[in-house]
Structure formats: C-alpha cells, structure tokens
Amino acid sequence: MNTIKKSASYIAFAFIGAVIALTLYSHFNSKDSQTVVMEQKPIQLTSYSQPVSLPQAQLPDLTLAAEKSVSAVVHITTKTKSNAYHFDGGNDIFEYFFGPRGYNRQEPQYSEAAGSGVIISEDGFIVTNNHVVDGAQDISVILNDNRKFSAKVIGHDPNTDIALVKIDAKNLTVLPWGDSEMLKLGEWVLAVGNPFNLTSTVTAGIVSAKSRSIKIMSGQMPIESFIQTDAAVNPGNSGGALVNSRGELVGINTAIASRTGSYSGYSFAIPASIVHKVVEDLRKYGEVQRALLGVSIADIDDKLAKEKRLDRTEGAYVAEVTQEGGAKAAGIKEGDVIVAINATKVNSRAQLQEQVGKHRPGDQVVVTVRRNGAEKVFNVTLKNTKGNTSIVKESLSLLGAEFGEISQKDRDRLNIDQGVQILKITSGKLKNVGVRAGFIITDVNKISVGSVEDIKRIVSQGSDKKPVLIEGVYPDGKWTYYVFDLNE
C-alpha cells in the first residue's frame, strides 16, 4: 500500500513539473521565434528583388555601333618644327622695335604628337581637333586597315577647336552624322579613338551632362557647349568620335577633366550640331562664318537674380546690347532674359551659344525673352563680326597673293630653312603696302612660317584691332618687313 502511494506521489510530482516546464518554455520561446521571423523576412525579400539576369537584360547592344565606328575613325600623327636662333649682328631702327633680323637658324627640332580623326566623306575629308594638327609641318593619317596617307589642313577654327584635313583616297568608310540635340541624359554612347597609340579603341559610357562649359577654348570668340560623358577618354582620343547606339557621329571627343593627365571619370565632346556647321563652312568658304546675336550674356544665379530683381533663375541674362547688332534692331533690350532660340529652351550662356552657333550671318532666328514677367518674341537677323550679313572672306584671300614653295637653291643662298614665297601679287593688302612678287615670308607676327597654312592660321588668330607684321627677304638678299591692318 505504501509502495502504491509513493508511486502515485512520484507521478503527480512529475506531472506538475512537466506542466511548469511546458509553461516556462512556451513563455520564453515564443519571444525568440518572433525575433527570428522579423530578421529573416527582409533578407528573403531583398534576395528576390534583385535577380541576376535583370541588369544584363537592360544593357544595350553596342556591337553594331562599335563595328561601324572603328573603320571610320583614323589615327593621326604629327611632326611640329621648332627653330632655334642666334643673332649675327646688325643695328637699325627695325631691330630696335621688332628685334633682330640678321640671324641664322640652327638645325630645326621636331616634336611628335598623336590624336584621332573621323572620316566624313568617301573622298578623304576628315574632321579632328584643331589642337591635334595646329602648327604641324607633317601630318600622317593611318586608317583602320593600316594604310597610311599624308594629309593637308583644309581649315581650322580655334573658337570650337575643330580642324578639317584631307587625304588623297577614295571609297572610304564614312561615319554618318547624328543629331546631338536629341541625346538624353543617361543615354549610352561610345568613345572611339587611339588612346596612348592603342589604335581602334572603343569605350562605353553614358551622357552625364549637356551644354557644359569648362573654359578651355583658345579662340577670340570661343563656343563651349560640351557633351559630358563617363566614357573613358585618354591622351590620343582627341579628335575621335563620340557615337550613339545607332552608330552615328554625335560629337568629337576633345578634353578630359583630370588632375593626373589621364582619365578620371569625366570626358567632354564637341556636339555634332556645332561640328557639322563648322566643317561645312571650312569646305565651302575656307573660313567659319560666325553668326552673332549682338548681345553680351550672363548666366543667372541666385545673386544676379536678387540684384536684378528677377523672379526666377532660368534663362540667359542680357547684360548688354551692341549698337550694330541684330538684337538691338529687333527690339531686344538690356535686362531682358532670353529663354528660347527657335523654340529650343536655353538656360545658360553655353546653351545659347550652341543654338546661335549653328547659324550663319544673314540667318533669322526667333528669340523668346522674358521682360517684366511677360514673354515677348522677336525675329532677329544674325550678323557677322563686321556688323553686316555678308560672307566673311578667308584671311588669305584678303592678302591678295599666290604662294609657293622656296627652291632649294634659294634656301641655300639665303641661308634659310623655311618660308613661303609670293609667286604673284593681285589686288589686296600686300599690294597696298608695296610687297612685290618674289618676296619670301619667313615670319608673321614674330612667328616662323613654313607653309601657307601657317600664314593663314597666324593671321586668322590675330586680333582684329592689331596690325599684321610680316618679315622676310627678297631673292636679292634684301631683308625687310611690312605692316598692314587686315580690317581696313
């Protein structure tokens, strides 16, 4: 009996202990299970929100554009001559004002450089950067199939850093023009060129910004409205192509933003809308026909908006209206804010320059301005740098001469290694100041010249307000100089 009672007591205690243990387990373990669920749920959701195949499916296929581009992008190499001088003597009034003329040239030194270019016609016209070929005495073009040609400069424009060169070839692969104004931020583009002499290199990126001004142009009236991309561009890419996903030329790669001289994430290209117009001018007229609106423009920031009591920071502020310009004749006033050109919105000086830069003197544009809170529309006839609508003649045609090379006999006899000889004098600036046929031009504005292109470049880069100084020697050994004003 006692044994039965003891067994019952053990069973009762065991039951009560089990109940207590289950209660405590349920109480504490329920909190832990909630914590685990809360930690696991976000992890599971995140893992399913980024499937591996999705980003790959969104990338564009750029293989066709790359294949079309590499055959139309060329490698350009240049040699530029620099001369050393030593003075032989002499003492006259000319030397007092302009420096010694009785000098001998030592052996010329050459510097070599390289860049890229884009074929734009089947018969050999190639567009590149002006800084790639500027001042070069020898220019070579290597095609993608390794054929090599000598090239000559047809024309150049320091204001946009564009140059046009020509090789003697036919049936070349051409890169078609694209519409740079249709580019959108985030759109994929290719940079095609020859960085570090690595020919036919293609890199990809997106359009990071448009109408960017970085203040690098060297001309008197620079136009800067760059396309900014993150496609890798390095030294040697200058003059190469910026291409859209359809294989169309939308820009000419020109510069990088870097503290090291190599690519650091940002590159800049001249938009095709500007390049195309400059190239057509150089082919047709030999010189860029610059159209001017006739205003001085300032970008609007918060400070200017408060100072001029503008109700918003949009548009381009008209700081000054020139007396002979088309803007004044149309009715635009100082203090107006230009908000559109031909219905295309402009929000900065760079955007305005890009829109006006597509036109020639005599073209008419529709300018929308905001004045006293209301919008007004004006039809403006663009003018040239001289205040009229006529086509500006290239500098060489104003000189009025035919030029040719110096014979080796004259080089040896006169102890000169370069220069340009005047073969024939016609009506123009040179005849007006007494220059005679046979005169050998050795220097223009104190810069040595070895080709007709050198003369053209130096004269066109000179200031409109400064006279042109040419120095040289006649076949009889007489050294002399002439000074004239190009604009009178």
Image: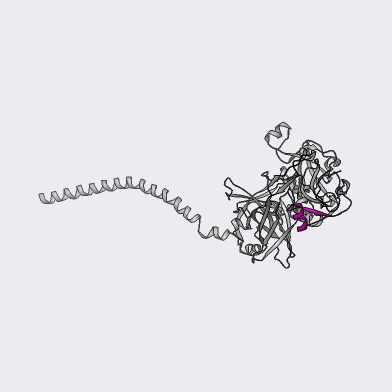
Nearest the eye: 91 or 111: 91
The quadrant of the image that shows the C terminus is top right
- Is residue 452 part of the magenta span, yes or no? no
Residue 225 can be seen in this image: yes
Q: Specify the farthest residue to the bottom.
A: 171
Residue 291 position within the rendered picture, expressed as x and y whole percent measured from the top left: 80, 47
Identity of the residue drawn at 50% across and 55% down: 49
Nearest the eye: 457 or 93: 93
In the image, residue 265 sits, relative to residue 165, either above or below, namely above
Residue 4 position within the rendered picture, expressed as x and y whole percent measured from the top left: 13, 51
Nearest the eye: 471 or 123: 471
Residue 165 position within the rendered picture, expressed as x and y whole percent measured from the top left: 73, 58
- Is residue 412 part of the magenta span, yes or no? yes
Q: Decide if residue 389 is on the left or right side of residue 194.
A: right
Q: How many marks?
A: 0
Identity of the residue drawn at 61% across and 53% down: 235
Q: Decide if residue 217 is on the left or right side of residue 31.
A: right
Residue 30 position within the rendered picture, expressed as x and y whole percent measured from the top left: 35, 47
Nearest the eye: 288 or 439: 439
* Coloring applied to the structure: one colour
Q: Which residues are magenta?
A: 404-426
Identity of the residue drawn at 48% across and 52% down: 46
Q: Quadrant of residue 60?
A: bottom right
